[in-house]
Image (spheres, rainbow, N blue to C red):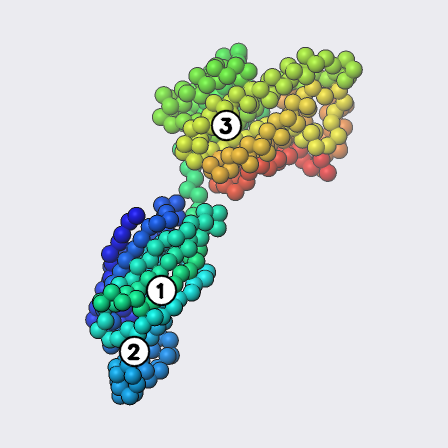
Amino acid sequence: MKQTNISVLPLQGPEVTHDDACAAPPFVDFDKVQAGDEFHCSKTIAAQDLDAFAEVSGDRNPLHMDEGFARRTHFQRRVVHGMLLANYVSALVGMRCPGPGALWSQQSFSWHAPVFIHDRVLFTLRVKHKAVGARALTIEVKAVNQDGKLVMDGDGVVTVLQERKEADELPITERVAFVSGGSRGIGAAISLALAQAGAAVMINYRSNTAAAEELCAAIQSNGGRAIPVQADVSDYRSIAEATQRAGNEFKHPVDVLINNAGSVPDPRPFMQTTWDDIRSSLDVHLRGAFHCCQAVIPRMIEQKSGRIINIGSAFVRTTPPANWSSFLIAKAAMQTMTRCLATELGPHGIRVNSVSPGLVETESIAGLPERSRKVQAMQTPLRRLASPADVAAVVVALCTGVGDFITGAEIPVCGGYPM
């Protein structure tokens, strides 16, 4: 139980002081208030306190304000307004018990004896009950005079408001991004765009060392920060070791994860597709993203900030190309994981989204017949296929302030094709 001795300031008069520390007090930390906490203040009532209260309230009852009138009653002297005593309780609630941000929602007081000018009143407030979900406190009130006589008691319920704070997100120039499958195609475009936006980029690759190093050299030659990182996303230990390099190379943990690594669609009729084909696709797309997430999320939670972007496919939500079942089953699973993580990680300040391209002009669709590509383009309102840069631009936007209030979203980058 804690006890705090303070003096409540009168409404006006010579005793009024100005405490700079209380000029703009922070909202009370509700978590620190506990049942049993007790606070005290004492106040000597002066004539000017009654005058000030009458001026504010309009209560000029002669029992309180007219000495002659009061002498003709059995009190023989001016009686302090009962609500003036309640005013001091309110001041204590709003400044100390529990403090700034507290708002009365219910109160019940009883007055047992009169208080007169020059009486000194000791107020005691005790937290009787704490309702965490409602952010409410039940407070007991007791006031005694200088002779120890009870003059007022009661209780009330106080709701503790919560200060609305804008998220203090890091700018992209202070972030470290890990781009799985970041050396070729869409991944390379994302790596380049993030570096141009100012992020430090870890370009992950599995086997094509030359492509990763060439891309890093191009980024560095333009003043950007990038390193190649070899790791197989299907191997958790390999990914965990790779992401830990961020601290050594950039003195900052990975706080932007782009799950881009995946296999090229291998069109095959469903009846010719084996479970091993499905499992292989799941291992590359879903398992790889799963491992990358588990490797970086703990540090994101520690710093209460992070961006995870999964590269999906617009064809999960619309008519897919024929014979793409294994590829799209894996992408559908990734999009479900996106929503699950967005729900779970949102309270930790981590945004999780999915960027879902349609057909993109990369080597991954090189085996697609030219006629199929032209038909797809003509069925798209913008009359073309996406470029890797189109996808990268949306990813970068989600990693900047534009994406501060976006999570659990699936953003199609396909020129309007799903319509």
Q: Disc 2 marks which amino acid?
A: Val
Q: Residue at x 25, y 58 (%)?
A: 6
Q: Kindly tell me whether residue 71 is visible in this rendering.
A: yes
- The reply, left or right, for residue 190 in relation to residue 72 is right
Residue mark closest to the camera, 1 vs 2: 1
Pick whichever of labels 1 and 2 is earlier in the sequence: 2
Residue at mark 1: 153
Estimate the spatial distance between the alpha carbons at disc 2 and disc 3, rounded to whole Å. 70 Å
Residue at mark 3: 257
Location of residue 11 by image quarter: bottom left
Residue 140 place in picture, x, y as percent: 37, 58
Location of residue 334 by image quarter: top right
Query: For residue 79, which numbered disc appears in the image?
Result: 2
Estimate the spatial distance between the alpha carbons at disc 1 and disc 2, rounded to whole Å. 18 Å
Q: Secondary structure at mark 1?
A: strand
Q: Disc 1 marks which amino acid?
A: Asp
